[in-house]
Image (tube, grey):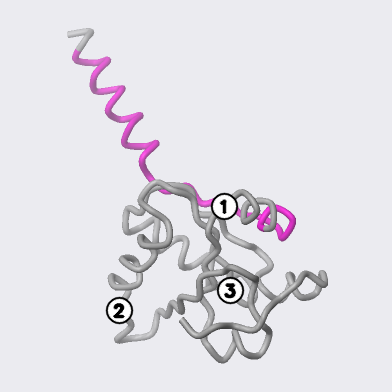
Amino acid sequence: MRITRLLVAASLLISVEAQAEIIDIDNAELARLQAKGVPVIDIRTPEEWRDTGVIKGAHLMTFSFTGGFDKAGWLKQEQQVAKPGQPVVLVCRSGRRSKAVADYMESQSVKGTIYHATGGMNAWKAEGRPVVAPIAP
């Protein structure tokens, strides 16, 4: 009986650890994570990318909650950028959309750490951090 309880407790711990963890980060942490090889996904629209530029090396992958958007297809594309269980950084204009996408990813049982850039590109630009012209995805 004791072994059964231990096995159940261990399986519960494993399932909890396998879920996504969302961590809010600032720009200094975003830059540090990117330098360590954690992929950055910019979920804004092509118009936004052109207006402000993008973080060098960011993967440009628009995400939308509007009707007709292929969320499942986006998740498959995201898994080509970061394999299941690997961390990823999400960035948008102000931090609101990227938080919503992080929550959506968690609800879809995406595994691993999802870093959410709380100030988005507005804060990145306000701090004078470098941007480059977007290359169409």
Q: Nearer the viewer, residue 106 or 89?
A: 89
Q: Does 102 sit left or right of 14 as displayed?
A: right
- What kind of residue is marked 2? Asp
Query: Based on the displayed image, in which of its 4 quarters is residue 78 positioned?
Result: bottom left
The reply to whether dot 3 and dot 1 touch (C-beta < 8 Å) is: no
For label 1, the crowd category at 10 Å Cα-Cα, with few meaning under 14, some 14 to 19 and many 20 or more, is: few
Chief SS of the magenta region: helix
Please, what secondary structure does the residue beneath circle 2 have?
Answer: loop
- What kind of residue is marked 1? Gly
Determine whether 97 is above or below 50 in the image.
above
Determine whether 80 is above or below 37 in the image.
below
Q: Mark 1 sits on what residue?
A: 37
Query: Based on the displayed image, in which of its 4 quarters is residue 72 positioned?
Result: bottom left
Q: Residue at x 46, y 75 (%)?
A: 61
Q: Disc 2 vs disc 1: which is toward the camera?
A: 1
Q: Mark 3 sits on what residue?
A: 92
Q: Mark 2 sits on what residue?
A: 70
For label 3, the crowd category at 10 Å Cα-Cα, with few meaning under 14, some 14 to 19 and many 20 or more, is: many
Q: Earlier in the sequence, mark 2 or mark 1?
A: 1
Residue 7 drawn in magenta: yes
